[in-house]
Amino acid sequence: MESQNLSRQRRERIDIIAAWSRSGILEERRRLLIEEQFTERVALMGSRFFVPLPLTYSDDLWYNTQVSFLLEAFDALPRRPDIAFDSVWKVLENTAHARFPHPPGGRPNITEALGHLSADPQLSGSVTEVLLGDVPSQTCGYLFKRLIAREPAESSGRALTRLSRGYGAGDVLPTEINAFLALVRSKYSAPDPDTARRGAMLLRRALTGESLDITGTRVGLSLPARFRILLSGLLFTARNERYHGESFSPFYSSAASIKTYTHPHYLFLTAYTLVHFVWAHSNHRYAPPLDAVEENAVVNLREARTLYAGHWTG
């Protein structure tokens, strides 16, 4: 039965392109089953899906460029939170470069910019805690594969390298993160699905800041360490895999379900919130109030939890 479903899904993708080859791309394609189910769920739940934060008017060219990409992201919602994440990532990347510009004559390096952003003490605050306090299980499973099971090898290796690097003098986060990941691997190294599920749930508890007992060792992650994992381990890894075509487009997969939507939804929402969080700590006239950013994050996570219900953490 599984092989039949896989074959049908593969044929369906080809059939969509075949239909467009006759009618042209302006004809709306037939939606896949999971897309129909998701649209029905959004309507049934009466969901607002996502509520953007009101922005201040400004003639600043850089700011207006970023706003254009935010609008591009919103246009992809609610059907394609993965594409919305791609668009809002551009704003996060530009924001990181603006806060930590490269040296004169040097080339922009997003790995360095994000590393320094994750080490910024101003950003280890309540907004970050809100985001880390409600990570969906699908996202934790993704992190477990990349950071613990080390799958796929190339993408995982790049993520672990980023987390092992220091950004600036006195950066002790790599030591803390590496020690934690090594401890988790010592207990959850077996590749079977049940072990992976339990390991992913342990990562979820660690990201919330819970103190854990792993093989007799009491361990917990500081907020800066958790923030670095969120920014350089999760968001940047997901962005790279999508940008380089290393991961399957999620909703065209034969394994897609309502739960599949939770991961890109969280990626989008987290990147969006972090953009406004960094802006709130700037001195620009368009900077939003910090308390408004936190309230908006709470509202949007509540919207997501209500929409997905048990799919968020199940």
Image (spheres, rainbow, N blue to C red):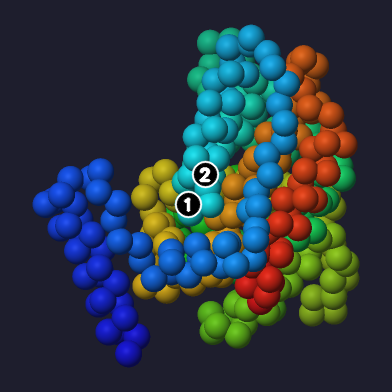
**Residue at horizontal 43 percent and vertical 49 percent from the top:** 242
- Residue 274 is labelled as none
Q: Is residue 238 left or right of residue 2?
A: right
Q: Secondary structure at mark 2?
A: helix
Q: Which label sits on residue 84?
A: 2
Q: Residue furthest bottom?
A: 1
Q: Are marks 2 and 1 in contact (CB under 8 Å)?
A: yes
Query: Who's the residue at 72% across and 31% down the image?
Result: 54
Q: Quadrant of residue 143?
A: bottom right
Q: Tell me: 135 left or right of 213.
A: left
Give the distance between the C-alpha atoms of the residues marked 2 and 1, in whole angstroms.
Answer: 6 Å
Where is residue 313 drawn, in percent x and y?
Answer: 69, 71
Q: Position of residue 245 (x, y in %)?
A: 36, 50
Quadrant location, the C terminus: bottom right
Amino acid type at circle 2 is Ala
* Count of picture labels: 2
Residue 220 in sight? yes
User: Is 29 positioned to the left or the right of 47 in the image?
Assistant: left
At x 30% / y 77%, what residue is drawn?
Answer: 6
Residue 307 pos. (x, y %): 65, 64
Question: Badge 1 is on which residue?
Answer: 80
Q: Residues within 10 Å of mark 1 (few under 14, many from 20)?
A: some
Depth check: 281 or 200 in front?
Answer: 281
135 or 42, nearer to the observer:
42
In the rendered view, tell whether residue 179 sits above or below residue 230.
below
Residue 110 at least partly seen: no
Q: Please state the horizontal and vertical placement of residue 220, each as a whole percent of the image.
A: 84, 62
Q: Amino acid at mark 1?
A: Arg
Q: Residue at x 82, y 42 (%)?
A: 294
